[in-house]
Image (tube, grey):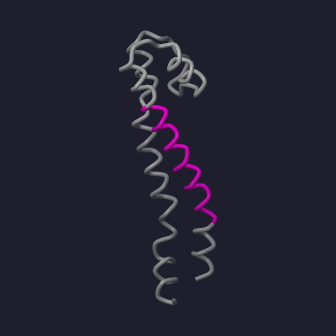
Amino acid sequence: MQNFTEYLAGIWPLTPLFLFIIAVGFRLLDNSAYLFLQKEILINSSNVSRANLKYQINVTKDPNFTRRLKRAMVFRDLQQSFMISAIISFPISLIFYFLN
């Protein structure tokens, strides 16, 4: 058990950083603003709201565009879940680091 806690103490401080990097990767894959600009839909910022995405999914008749918007929403959900995981794991990693 002592070896396992030493192993966790060595790896766990880097876990929030890895989760953050994965979240940034999913944010880069979320190209919803680019999709809107391709269809000549004007937006105010590069961060398109979830309500606007859902509205366009319901209104749009183009199945290819709808599929790409749904994929962008999945990437946004994954990005948010990994970001929350990174935030939650940060205090835990600090506890593991200073208790060892």
Q: Is residue 24 left or right of residue 89?
A: left
Q: Is residue 77 magenta?
A: yes
Nearest the camera: 40 or 60? 60
**For residue 75, which quarter of the picture?**
top left
Image location of residue 46, percent across then percent down: 50, 25
Q: Is residue 37 magenta?
A: no
Image location of residue 2, percent across then percent down: 51, 90
Residue shown at the point (41%, 44%) measured from the top left: 25
Q: As drawn, which residue projects farthest toward the left?
A: 64
Our reading of the magenta stretch's main secondary structure is helix
Image location of residue 58, percent across then percent down: 53, 18
Residue shown at the point (50%, 37%) measured from the top left: 76
Residue shown at the point (47%, 88%) measured from the top left: 3
How many numbered marks appear?
0
Residue shown at the point (51%, 77%) measured from the top left: 9
Image quadrant for the C terminus? bottom right
Q: Is residue 35 above or below residue 17?
A: above
Q: Is residue 45 above or below residue 74?
A: above
Image location of residue 89, percent across then percent down: 58, 62
Q: Is residue 39 above or below residue 30?
A: above
Q: Which residues are magenta?
A: 71-91
Q: As drawn, which residue projects farthest toward the bottom?
A: 2
